[in-house]
């Protein structure tokens, strides 16, 4: 179980979680160890360009929505370097990134669902 699995569990349970993911696949949108805030999301409102916390083929990613299939209730997840991770159902999209280092992500407003704040999670 990876570090993002624990975060996904908390977000799926209704918490808004602050954490510091590592890696370079989302540069320059998210740099390694920047503080991000992820809140529970209504997947039916997602758009291309949203950053989501989602499980694809057994792995949890904090990556971009690169395509939307509303009829099939699924989204395609990709990193910010052109690699497509795959399609995943709305039931495996746990949250949306609402802020990076205290800068609000445009487009995230109105896509979250009621959540409890849990600012203590660190990964």
Image (spheres, rainbow, N blue to C red):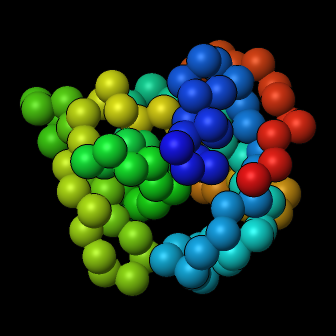
Q: Which residue lies at the image location 26% right of the left edge and 48% below the top edge? A: 57
Q: Can the viewer see residue 63 in this picture?
A: yes
The front one of 73 and 83 is: 83
In the rendered image, residue 19, in percent from the top left (x then y), is placed at 76, 51
Q: Is residue 95 left or right of residue 65?
A: right
Where, by quadrant of the figure, is residue 85 drawn?
bottom left
Up-down relation of residue 113 to residue 22 (above or below): above
Q: Can the viewer see residue 109 in this picture?
A: no
Up-down relation of residue 83 to residue 122 (above or below): below
Q: Which residue lies at the image location 67% right of the left edge and 61% below the top edge? A: 21
Q: Which residue lies at the image location 49% right of the left edge and 77% below the top edge? A: 25
Up-down relation of residue 45 to residue 63 (above or below): above
Where, by quadrant of the figure, is residue 88 drawn?
top left
Callout count: 0
The front one of 8 and 90 is: 8
In the rendered image, residue 74, in percent from the top left (x then y), is placed at 21, 38
Residue positioned most to the left: 71
Q: Which residue lies at the image location 63% right of the left edge and 49% below the top edge? A: 3
Q: Is residue 37 left or right of residue 62?
A: right
In the rendered image, residue 20, in percent from the top left (x then y), is placed at 75, 59
In the rendered image, residue 102, in percent from the top left (x then y), is placed at 84, 57
Residue positioned most to the right: 120
Q: Is residue 82 left or right of residue 22?
A: left
Up-down relation of residue 19 to residue 115 (above or below): below
């Amino acid at each position: 179980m990876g570090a993002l699995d624990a975060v996904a569990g908390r977000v799926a349970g209704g918490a808004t979680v602050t954490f510091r993911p590592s890696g370079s696949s989302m540069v320059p949108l998210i740099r390694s160890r920047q503080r991000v805030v992820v809140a529970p999301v209504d997947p039916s409102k997602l758009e291309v360009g949203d950053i989501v916390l989602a499980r694809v083929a057994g792995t949890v990613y904090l990556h971009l929505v690169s395509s939307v299939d509303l009829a099939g209730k699924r989204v395609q997840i990709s990193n910010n370097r052109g690699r497509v991770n795959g399609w995943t159902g709305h039931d495996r999209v746990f949250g949306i990134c609402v802020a990076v280092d205290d800068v609000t992500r445009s487009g995230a407003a109105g896509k979250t669902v009621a959540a409890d704040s849990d600012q203590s999670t660190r990964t």
